[in-house]
Amino acid sequence: MRTKKAGVGIIIGALAGLAIASFSARNAWAVVYPVPDTQKTNYLPNSHIAGADTVNVTDPFERSSSQQEVICAGFYVFDQNEQLQECCGCPISEDGLLTVQSSSGSTGASSATAPGGDLVSNPFFLKGGASTPLPFANVKIVSFNLNAPNPVIAAQNPFICDATGGTYPYGQYPFPSLRADNNTGEGVATLSLTPSLRAWATHLQNQTNLTESEFRDVPLLQSDANNYAEWCGDIQQAGSGRSVCSCGTDTSL
Amino acid sequence: MMRLTTMKRSIGRYGAVLGLIIGAGLAGSSMAQAQATPVFPTAFSVNYFNNPGTNGLDEIYIQNETNNGNSIPGTNYCAMIYAFYPDQELIGCCGVPITPNETWTNSMGQFMIGIDNAGPLPTKGSIKVVATNYPGVCDPSGDTAAATPTPHALQSWISHTNTLLSPVNGTFMTEEPFAQTGEPVTDYANLEFQCQTVGPGYCGGSK
């Protein structure tokens, strides 16, 4: 008798558990959770001074069935007025080191190919009709998987890290074959988020002292990442050459 | 009689709770995703080095954070160290035992000379420290002794020398603790394998 009651209890409990779990799963569509360890943030003071601040990024995860060997560090650079001014995506391999300067010393579109990298010298907004490097920058780094390989361009560059999520593949990766995919700067921009970059930035303080800090983790929803990508496409499309930052040519692959 | 009834109710109630847990567990497991997810606490930590130079100023420090007499008794641990070129190629690897409350240190320049069996000496790169148990010898390749990554064991720091050109002009030193990576324990086998290919070097340094 005791065993029978216990058995009935287990069955009822199991059914209730499945019902609750099923309810939770259905409502998971409404409750959205951040994708862990995919967004880092830091600041760059006096960023317009050539070589003043430096960002170092590494991907510590080893390649596995759930982690690609090469992933992307998406840089989204904001000014003090919340405006996204520059963006770019930089490939980085497991245990590799990507080093990017805040400013290369050049300005405008030419800084987008600066060998040492450049995050602030090609902003979307013009001042007096000319590009003016940002004196202070807020930098978000989003880690995502390589964009889906385009078979036409794969031979030219298999490591496409399009920070626009494909909404405007003119800016950083001006491959004609990509342009057919989308050239509007609009639409759904999906970044395939993946952990787990670690980054540090040096800060030139008061133009006399240098400090350094690790990028801090910030929760990131998939929808937030998609917003970054779409905004990035928007400013690169409207900028016609502006708004593209430089990863540098220093290999991190 | 009352006791028997109460007991029966309890059995039924516990059965229901058990079933609830089993049911939720079954449903939860079906929702698991196959994406790399950081796990903390972790035995893995990472930082970068620049301008090591054979006579450079940069230093690395690794401390055994445990203490004899505490609730978690202090014990020896290995610091397994792996340094990489910026393009991910392994420069070299070494292992050093560290006793409770002890700090091991070395200059990055001398450290690179000790671990770099093939050259060239790097100008910058990433560096990873894995805390493991102490199986009698600290072998980062796992050839002579198998070690197991162990969280809550070591803390590490590294200094960076930064040379700023005009218009700032100057040499500045900064320092950072190593960042916890949260990578899966299975990554350790990958690191051991890479270390086997270049051969373990010598950490050198002082305690």
Image (spheres, coloured by chain):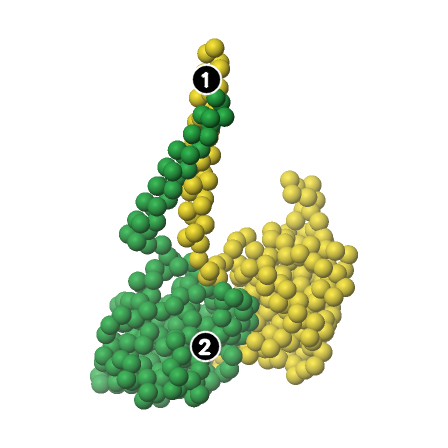
Chain colours: A green, B yellow
> What is the chain identity of the residue bearing mark 1?
B
State the image quarter where residue A190 is shown.
bottom left
The answer to whether A1 appears left or right of B161 in the picture is left
Judging depth in this view, the residue of B37 and A77 nearest the camera is B37
Residue A252 visible in the current orientation: yes
Mark 2: amino acid: Pro
Q: Quadrant of the C terminus of chain B?
A: bottom right
**Tag shown at residue A204:** none
- Where disc 1 sits, the SS reads helix
The residue beneath circle 1 is: B6
Given this view, does label 2 or label 1 mark the residue nearer the observer? 1
State the image quarter where residue A38 is shown.
bottom left
- Where disc 2 sits, the SS reads strand
x then y, percent, for residue A234? 25, 76
> What is the chain identity of the residue bearing mark 2?
A
Contact, mark 2 vs mark 1 (Cβ under 8 Å): no
Q: Are marks 2 and 1 on the same chain?
A: no
At a point 59% along the width and 69% down the height, the residue shown is B127
The answer to whether B15 appears left or right of A120 in the picture is right
x then y, percent, for residue A35? 39, 59
Judging depth in this view, the residue of A69 and A49 nearest the camera is A69
The residue beneath circle 2 is: A91
Near mark 2 (Cα within 10 A), the count class, few <14, some 14-19 or many ≥20, is many
Residue A122 visible in the current orientation: no
x then y, percent, for residue A2? 49, 22
At a point 25% along the width and 81% down the height, the residue shown is A183
At a point 31% along the width and 67% down the height, the residue shown is A226
Mark 1: amino acid: Thr
